[in-house]
Image (spheres, helix red, strand yellow):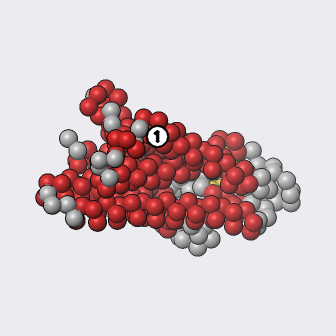
Amino acid sequence: MNAPSTETTNSISHFILMGFPSSPEMQLLYFGLFSVVYILTLMGNTAIVYAVLWDRRLHTPMYIFLGNFSLLEICYVTTTVPNMLANFLSTSKTISFVSCFTQFYFFFSFGYDEGFFLCIMAFDRYLAIRRPLHYPRIMTKQLYTGLVIFGWSGGLILFLTPVVLISQLPFCGPNTINHFLCDPVPLMMLSCSEDTITQLIYSTFNAFFMIGTFLFILCSYALVILTALWMPSRAGKHKAFSTCASHLAVVVLFYGSIMVMYICPGSGHPVKIQKFITLFYSVITPLCNPLIYSLRKR
């Protein structure tokens, strides 16, 4: 399985994803559990996308952004969970070099896109609540269409640099990744050479993205909350806080876990903790988001 360690060029054609090592019975239990989670995630997010598409009353910027966010969640979870389910039933648990980096690219690109859409949704709520009279004139069809295009393409373009740099590292063995997906941290640890420049570039991308988008979202909602506090109407305050609460709950779920993992890839989290945190934001969060948004809105 492992390539000779004396080679200095890429000699690995595939990687082994260990996933969650356990007995065959536990593997079947994991398969059943995560199959249910995956199906529920698809159903919940598809229901939101369907509602936004077919109900003309929901053809407003807020719900168009939400529908695109739900569609993005479907793409995000589909980059990893089907392969994870297949590995539960597999004895080899292999993934080709190209498939591994393809999964790596789309998983993290869609993750970046989620951050951009959370920023867009925060900006939309800022305009709607802080400048309600000017909102229809500012949030035109051209603007929200452009924001949707940016939300989808931003991560796909931005994450090209880190994935290309990491894919160019020399991998000459071993080829076993103690994870359930092709995560950049264990991938860089498998490289024959310790490329500190690539690690620094990768960490810098993550730090600027996560801290920048997170601060933008916090500032937007802080201004929204200040505006809501000055509203004379109790109903207006309740509506503003209700909208913010659902958005902020999703922000906390998403950013709370990924900041721990990816700003400092060399921070040395235990492997089990790394898997749990990654499982939380890659599988559990997309399951919870439809419930959070649906419970807050009829």
Q: Residue at x 66, y 61 (%)?
A: 202
- In the displayed structure, 216 sits above or below 89; it is below
194 relative to 234 in the view: left or right: right
Q: Is residue 38 visible?
A: no
The residue under label 1 is 143
- Residue extending farthest to the left is 234
Q: Which element is circle 1 on?
A: helix
Q: Residue at x 62, y 60 (%)?
A: 205
Under mark 1, the amino acid is Leu
Q: Is residue 117 visible?
A: yes
| Image quarter of the C terminus | top left
- In the displayed structure, 285 sits above or below 156; it is below
Q: Quadrant of residue 138?
A: top left
Q: Position of residue 269 (x, y in %)?
A: 54, 71
- Residue extending farthest to the bottom is 267
Q: Nearer the viewer, residue 144 or 194?
A: 144
Q: Residue at x 22, y 65 (%)?
A: 229
- In the displayed structure, 266 sits above or below 95; it is below
Q: Position of residue 71 (x, y in %)?
A: 43, 38
159 relative to 261 in the view: left or right: right
